[in-house]
Image (tube, rainbow, N blue to C red):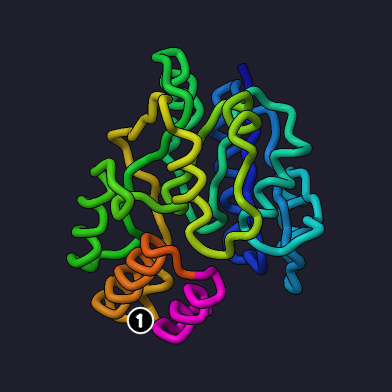
Amino acid sequence: MSISVIIPTLNEVSAISFLVNYLFQNGAGFLKEIIVSDGGSTDNTQAAAIGAGARVIASPERGRASQMNYGASVASGDVFYFVHADTIPPASYAGDIMAALDEGYDLGRYRSEYQSDRWLLKINAFLSKLDTLEGMGGDQTLFISRKLFQESGGFDKSLKIMEEFEFCARARKNRKYKIFNKAASISARKYETNSWFTIQKANYRIFRMYKSGASQESMVKAYKEMLHYR
């Protein structure tokens, strides 16, 4: 069994080299490849990723769902592991994934911890332990067997927001879903330009809109209006 790591990127030069090197160093003999699916970066993301040893592909469509699908379409591993460029999984990630598969799990994620000392973010970290829609997010990374990913049809590329939530809800039906006790280390850069309360208010509004069937355009518009994010 082998792992293909798939990283969707857009202007992530500040983070990508460290992440790729870190993933290779901790692959524990299970990591087959790291695929960076780029959405048209205008900085040196692609060159930095290549320099660190990743395979870089230019996604024909921009958007995390499309980029992750495109990465999966060229991946050759038995397991796909989707990681955001500003997230660092535990050093034991490869062994953790393989142990979960041996235990009969088909997909799963880590809990959250943030690269910040702000005590309010500990609330977010606590909620990530829970198996609820509000308790998960793409930043926590996602592993899934190649077979299940293909059977599930991949991410819905029409989605510009909530794509991981929708995919997991669909893919995990009648499947064993693992939430590791360990945590992925998530960048707190969004909190550098927005207050914790503003972000929670925005997230709550998007959750409500998503559950009520709001359009993607209206959700993206609402999120951008509420938050200042690079």
- When the figure is inspected, residue 119 is found, relative to residue 33, above or below; the finding is below
Residue lying at 34% horizontally and 75% vertically, measured from the top left: 202
- When the figure is inspected, residue 73 is found, relative to residue 164, above or below; the finding is above
The quarter of the picture where the N terminus appears is top right
Left or right of residue 72: residue 131: left
Q: Quadrant of residue 102?
A: top left
Residue lying at 57% horizontally and 27% vertically, measured from the top left: 148
Residues 146 and 123: in front is 146
Q: Position of residue 104 (x, y in %)?
A: 42, 15
Residues 210 and 220: in front is 210
Numbered range of the magenta stretch: 215-230
Q: Quadrant of residue 195?
A: bottom left
Farthest front residue? 213
Dominant secondary structure (helix, strand or loop) of the stretch shown in magenta: helix
Residue lying at 35% horizontally and 60% vertically, measured from the top left: 115
Residue lying at 37% horizontally and 60% vertically, measured from the top left: 211
Q: Kindly state the secondary structure of the residue where label 1 is placed.
A: loop
Is 31 within the magenta? no
Is 216 within the magenta? yes
Q: Position of residue 5 (x, y in %)?
A: 62, 38
Residues 112 and 107: in front is 107
Q: Amino acid at mark 1?
A: Asn
Count all numbered tags in the image, as a single digit. Answer: 1
Which residue is label 1 attached to? 194
Left or right of residue 21: residue 225: left
Left or right of residue 117: residue 151: right
Q: Position of residue 95 (x, y in %)?
A: 47, 23
Left or right of residue 185: residue 46: right
Estimate how packed mark 1 is, as few (under 14), some (14 to 19) or many (20 or more) residues with alpha carbons within 10 Å: some
Q: Position of residue 68 (x, y in %)?
A: 65, 48
